Structures are given as structure tokens and as C-alpha cells.
Image (cartoon, grey):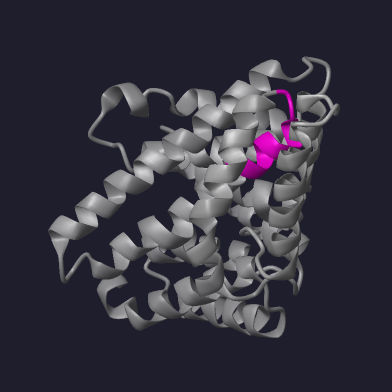
Amino acid sequence: MALPSLGYSLLRTLMLVLCLTLALGACSPRQLIIDGVANELASQGAAPEDDLELAREASAFYLKLSESLLRSSPGNLRLAESVTAGFTQYAFAFVAFEAEKIENRDTRKAKALRERAARLYARAQRHGMTALERSSPDGLQVGLAYWTAAAWGSWIALSKHDPEIVAQLPQVIRLAQQAWEVDPDWGQGALASLMGSLELSRPGGSRAAALHHFDRAIVLAGEQVAGPLVTKAEAIAVPAGDRAGFEQLLQRAIAIATRTPNLQNEAMLARARWLLANADELF
């Protein structure tokens, strides 16, 4: 979950935006300037940052600015992937998760948060699909396809009351499968985890096949990424009633996230701790 970075890198980006905006009055071509800013913003998604709250506070600005530039530079696939990923991650880490945490205290607010998360996932999916439709048919952009499928699947998961949205699941699976055929190891297990989740969500899905994907994801993640362990704990251990396995997976995820602090792991650390604290309700 590589959330937008802040600090010096964002300040540098803002200075670049200001400088290039002023340059619009000069002789430089406008689209070239827009593309330059777009490329700079796209690169921020991979910059290091380990303060989850700091990221949350600045994400809205980052996403709105990136989205605005994407409209002016729709062919910029790097920026499209960054925007699609950004909205998906923001919805997951800061909106949908908050809904889960307050469900028992305030069902009305939790419902509103889930609806907002669904809208954000849908927004990410639209950006991703628009960019994929513009991309070369000869080479699928795996990262863009992954984030589009992840957003799409998450939107469906929060829209089970809407049969028209749920009916789109085969399209999500097909998109993820296309990415898998190009690069099954993409994202240190991220794509493998998504394949496992989609396998469980499809009618007649195979638990054994899903488990294979999750285990592959954990191997690919190594001792650097906690996400696949948390995903397996929720998707496999909880339905199986395997509390010991659930706790073992989450404790390992916590250890990895603690040793390797970054935004992706910080988000998974928060979720793993919350899941452990609420284990009695899950089993």
C-alpha cells in the first residue's frame, strides 16, 4: 500500500507546480509543462514515507491535484496508475477500515463511510479503465491493471445490494488474469493476493487454488511486506475457524511491519492489531 509520500518530496513537487504554472505565460508548450508536472506527481507514489497520519492529512490534496492533471494529460499511464492506486489505497486504509472499526458503536456513520469508500473505489476504477482503454493493445500495463482490478473488486464487495455492479465480477477476474499472465510475481505478492481473493469471491471458487495464490504471495513478499499475511488470515483462517493460524499469521505480519516501516506496512500493522483485538468476535 504505497500511499503518497509527503515532506520534502511533496514540497519539491509543489515548488515545481508553482514554477511551471508561472512558465505557462512564457513560450513553453502548455502540454509539455503539464506532462512534466504529471510525471513528477506520479513519482511521488513510490517515495518513502512511514507516517500514516501525515499521509492521510495530505492525501486529499495530492489526489485532487493528480486527478486534475490526469484530465489534462489522459495518456500519461504512470500518472493514471498513481491516481488509480491513490484513490484505492485511500478508500481502503482511511475510509473502509474506519467503517469497520466504528461499526459496533455507530452503524449509521459506518454505513455512510462504506458508501463513501464504494464511491472512491468506483472513481479509481473509472480512472484505471479509461487509461487502460487508451493504452497500447500490444502491452498490458500490469500495475495499472492490478490497481484497476483491486479497486473494481473492492467496489463490488461494498455494493452487494446492487446486482448490476455485482454482475461485473467476471470482468474484474478477467482483467486480473490478464495481468497475471504477463507478470504473476508483480508487486511482491500483491497480484498473487488479489488472485486468491478473487478466486474465493467467484461462484464455485476453489479454496485450494486461493490458498496456493496466498502462499505464493507470502513467499514473494518475503520479510519485507506484511500485506499477504493479513490477507490470508482474513480470507482463509477466519472462514476455516482456525484461530491459532489466524493469530500466527497476524503476529508474523506485525513483526514484519515493525521491522520494515513504510506506509504500506503501517496500514497493515494497524489492521493486524485491530483484527487481533477483535478476534473474539471473529471466532
Q: Tell me the quarter of the image containing the N terminus.
A: bottom right
Instruction: Residue 147 in the image: state x and y as whole percent.
Output: 61, 41
Q: How many marks?
A: 0
Instruction: Residue 125 in the image: state x and y as whole percent.
Output: 51, 32
What is the magenta segment's predominant secondary structure? helix
Instruction: Residue 184 in the image: state x and y as whole percent.
Output: 76, 42
Please indicate, yes or no, whether residue 45 appears anywhere in the rendered image.
no
Q: Tell me the quarter of the image containing the C terminus.
A: bottom left
Please indicate, yes or no, whether residue 242 appears anywhere in the rendered image.
yes
Task: Specify whether residue 78 is painted magenta.
Answer: yes
Where is 116 relative to 13, above or below? above
Write the residue at 68% across / 70% down: 7
Instruction: Residue 219 in the image: state x and y as whole percent.
Output: 75, 63
Instruction: Identify the image quadrant of residue 249.
Output: bottom right
Between 170 and 29, the residue placed more toward the observer is 29
Q: The magenta stretch spans which residues? A: 75-83
Write the residue at 64% across / 78% down: 257
